[in-house]
Structures are given as structure tokens and as C-alpha cells.
Amino acid sequence: MDPIFLFDLASKQANWLTSRQAVLSRNVANANTPGFRAQDIEPFSATMDKTALEMTATSSSHLGTSSDNLRTARPRNDTKNNWGVFHSGNSVNIEEEMLKAGEVSRQYSLNTSIVKSFHKFILTSARGPG
């Protein structure tokens, strides 16, 4: 039976959600700063694609590997989804940031619910029929 890395995956998503919440909080904190551009981080799926495990080539006929896939979640300018840029050059929209913060909260709640259910499942299976 292959090992299940659900807890590791949930931990990575929780760290990603923490990073995203920090970026969104910084956006809200700078809502009145002239010239500040709203930022967001890459979606979790893109982050996971970039941090995938690499294969080790033991033969020259194996598929090639690349080390440029290892990246962390970094803030990026969110230019395609901005709701508008104000006269001051600031692109932060409080309503949009609150919607994103609510999305982060829902994802975190789902993450913890899945981990709790999986933990309960493991404890139940370890106890056995009783």
C-alpha cells in the first residue's frame, strides 16, 4: 500500500493560504497609498505544479529533469483582474479584497474539515472493530 500524503498536502495548502491572506491584508492596509498596486499570489494548483517532485535519472535514456520547477508562492501584480485604477494610481478595491479574503477563509475551513475527517478515519481504523 502506498503512503498517503494528505497531511503534507493539507499543510502546504495551509501555508499557501497564509501567504495569500498576508498579501491580501497588505493590499487592504495600503488601500489609500498613492501608486500602490494590488497584488495576489499564484493559484495553489500552479504552485503545486511548480513544486512537484523531480525524477532522478539513473540512465541517459531517462526523461530529462529540470530544477527550475522549484519555486515558492510569491506575490505577483494582479493586473488582469483589477476592478479599476483610481486617480491616485492605486489599484486596491476593498470589496474585491474582501471577496478574496472570504474565499481564503472558506478554503481554510474546507482544508481543516478534510484533515479532521481524515484524522478521525485513521483513528477509527486503528481501533479496529470493537
Image (tube, grey):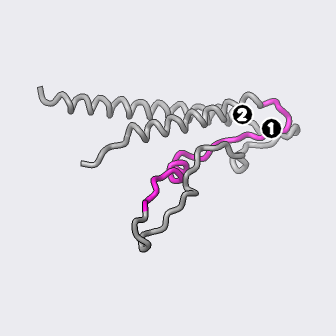
57 up-or-down from 8: above or below: below
- Work out which residue is located at the far right of the displayed protein and give it: 87
Q: Amino acid at mark 1?
A: Phe
Of 74 and 36, nearer the camera is: 74
Q: Which mark is residue 36?
A: 1
> Exactly how many numbered labels are in the figure?
2
| Picture quarter with the C terminus | top left
Disc 2 crowd, CA 10 A, few/some/many (<14, 14-19, 20+): many
Residue at screen point 36% across, 42% down: 5
Residue 124 at what x, y percent from top left?
22, 29
Q: Main secondary structure of the magenta part?
A: loop
Of 13 and 54, nearer the camera is: 54
- Work out which residue is located at the far top of the displayed protein and give it: 130
The answer to the question of whether label 2 and label 1 lie on touching residues, with beta carbons closer than 8 A, is: yes
Residue at screen point 85% across, 35% down: 34
Q: Amino acid at mark 2?
A: Asn
N-term-proximal mark, 2 vs 1: 2
Q: Which residues are magenta?
A: 31-56
In the image, is residue 105 part of the stretch drawn in magenta? Answer: no
In the picture, measured across the screen, residue 36 lies left or right of residue 19, that is right
Residue at which label 2 appears: 27
Disc 1 crowd, CA 10 A, few/some/many (<14, 14-19, 20+): some
In the image, is residue 32 part of the stretch drawn in magenta? Answer: yes
Of 76 and 84, nearer the camera is: 76
57 up-or-down from 79: above or below: below
Residue at screen point 57% across, 46% down: 43
